[in-house]
Image (spheres, rainbow, N blue to C red):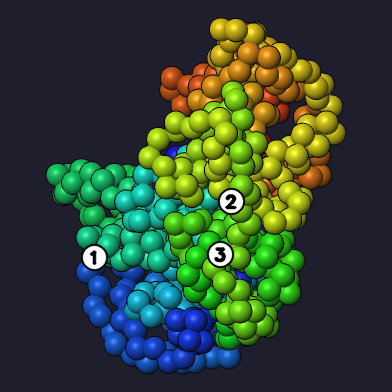
Amino acid sequence: MGLFNKFAVIVTTGLLVSGCQNNALVKQEAPEQSVAITQQSSSSKPATAVRHQPKQASDLWQLSRDNFALNLDQPQQRITSQLNWYSKHPQYMQRVAVRAGRYYHYILGEVLKRGMPAEIALLPIVESAYDPFAYSHGRAAGPWQFIPGTAKHFGLKSSWWYDGRRDIVASTDAALTYLQQLNKRFGDWELALAAYNCGGGNVSKAIRRNKKKGLPTDFWSLDLPKETEAYVPKLLAVSKMIRDAQQHNLTLPELANKPVFEIVELDSQIDLAQAADLADISTQELYQFNPGFNRWATDPAGPHRLLIPVSSSQQFRRELAQLPAEDRVNWTRYKIRSGDTMSTIARRFDTTTEVIRSANKMTRNNIRAGKYLLIPTARNQSSDYVLSKAQRFNRKQSQLAQSNRKKQTYTVQSGDSFWKISRQYKVSVRQLASWNQMAPGDPLRSGQTLVIWKTDNSTTLSRNDQQLIRKVGYQVRSGDSLARIAGKFRVTVKDIKRWNKLNGDKYLQPGQRLTLYVDVTNTH
C-alpha cells in the first residue's frame, strides 16, 4: 500500500494473534458469530449488493471460501502467471498461512462485519506476508503497509513510544476504512485495490485517459504502474490458491474459528515487563502480540490497551485490577546537577525531553541545578525489553562487533557536528547518530565520546540481524544517488556498495535493482 513503487518486505519475524474481547474490562467482539454482510462483485461494472447470511464454518479457511466474492476465474494471463508462481512455491504459502493464523481470526471477522469480500483478509499476504514488522523502501510499515502520510490521514498515531502502523487492531481498522472509501469512490473492488496500491489519483488519471480514447475503464484495461498491474492479480491468485488448495497440493494449517487473544482495555501507561508478569507470559511474547509498542512501556498518551492471549487473559485482568495505576510504571526522583540539560537527562534515562516535560507538567526545557525531576523508568533490565531503544542499541553494537566491522571512538571537539564528523569518517549522519543512541538533531558536547563502526567488504549479516533487520529490494529512480538512498534508509553509502558489490567508478542507472538491509525499528 502506498506509493506505486513500494516493494514490500516479506520476512518472518513479528508474531501476533487475533481474537475477541469478553469481559467488563474488555469490549465484546465476536467475529466468529453469524454476521449479515453485503458483498460486491469485482468486475469492472458497478457492484450489485447481495445480502446473505454467511455459513459459520469451524475452520477459518472454509469460512473464507464461503465468503469469497471477487471473480477469481477470469481468463486473465496476469492471474495465471501469479498463480503459477504460488503453485510452484507451496512452502512459501504454507509459511505465510501459519503466520497469518496469528491474526486471521480477528482480521477476517472485521472484514466480514463490514460486508467486505473475504479476499480482503488475505491482502496482508500480498502487502507484508502478514509480518507486522515488514518495512518497504517507500517507508511503508506494518501488516497493511501504510506510508507515514496515509497513516496520519487515517488517524494512525506515531510517537516515540508507539507506531500505529504496526498495531494489528488500529492498522486493520484504518486499512479497511480506506479500502471501503476507495470502493465507494470507484464502485469496483479491483479498482479500489489498485488505488490502495498506487493511489486513487493515479487510478483516476488512468480512467480519464481511457475515456478520452474510448477504451474500457475496468482494471484490466487501464495503463497503471507495473507493480499495481501485478498487485491485484497477486491477491486474486492467493485467494484462488486458498479456495482450491487441494487442487494445487497446498496443505494449509488448521485455523480454528475461535479467538486467540483478547483486547484488554487499560486506563493508564504500564511497564511491559510488569504486564508480562501479570499475564504470566514472557516479555517477548507480549511484544509479539503488541508490535505497535516500541519501548519498555505503553504510550502514556494511549492507546491504553494490550492484546493478551486468551489462556492468560483472566489472570491478567485479575492481577491488573489489584494494581493501582501509579504502581504500573516506576518513577525515579532525579536531582538536577550542574551542567545538566533536558537532552542529557533524557538520554541518561532512555527517554525524551517531551516525556520528562509531560511527567513534570513543564512547558519548557528550562531547569535549575538542585531541583528535582520525576522520570518514568523501566522496572527490569534493558535486555528484557526486546524492542526498546536501549536493547536495540545494545543488540546493534553486538551485531556490528560480530559482522567484521571495526569499532573506533571519537572525542567531540568544539565546533563539531554530526555532519562534520560523518564527512570525516565517510558515514551517514543518521548512521552515526544511531550508533550512539542519538537523533541527528541532538546537540553534541565537547569531550563527548562517539562510537564509529567501519565496515569491510563482507556481505554477510549475522544471524541476530534477522530479528530487526529487513532485506529491502530497491529500484533506482531518475535522480537517485548513493548518498540520497543511504540517507533515506539510514544506512551508509559504503554499506550499499558492500551489499551490492558496486564499483565506485560506476554510476547508478534508473531501473537498477539494489539490495538494502534496513533496521525497521529505526525508521519513520
State the residue at coordinates (74%, 66%). Answer: 282
Front residue of 387 and 175: 387
Which amino acid, by three-letter code, is at mark 1? Lys
Q: Residues within 10 Å of mark 1 (few under 14, many from 20)?
A: few
Q: Mark 1 points at which residue?
A: 184
Q: Is residue 168 left or right of residue 404?
A: left
Q: Mark 3 points at which residue?
A: 326
Disc 3 vs disc 1: which is toward the camera?
3
Front residue of 183 and 351: 351
Q: In this view, does 455 lie to the left or right of 271?
A: right
Q: Pointer 2 and pointer 3: residues touching (CB < 8 Å)? A: no
Residue 521 lies, with reference to residue 516, above or below; the image says below
Residue 423 lies, with reference to residue 130, above or below; the image says above
Front residue of 81 and 366: 366
Question: Can the viewer see residue 179 in this picture?
Answer: no
Which amino acid, by three-letter code, is at mark 2? Pro
Mark 3 secondary-structure assignment: helix
CA gap, disc 1 and disc 2? 46 Å
Farthest-out residue, front: 370
CA gap, disc 2 and disc 3? 11 Å
Which amino acid, by three-letter code, is at mark 3? Glu
State the residue at coordinates (79%, 37%). Answer: 399
Residue 151 lies, with reference to residue 189, above or below; the image says above
- Res 451 → quadrant: top right
Question: Can the viewer see residue 347 in this picture?
Answer: yes
User: Where residue 42 appears, x then y in whole percent?
Assistant: 33, 69
User: Where residue 112 appears, x then y in whole percent?
Assistant: 41, 79
Q: Residues within 10 Å of mark 3 (few under 14, many from 20)?
A: few
Q: Name the residue under label 2.
A: 376
- Res 180 → quadrant: bottom left
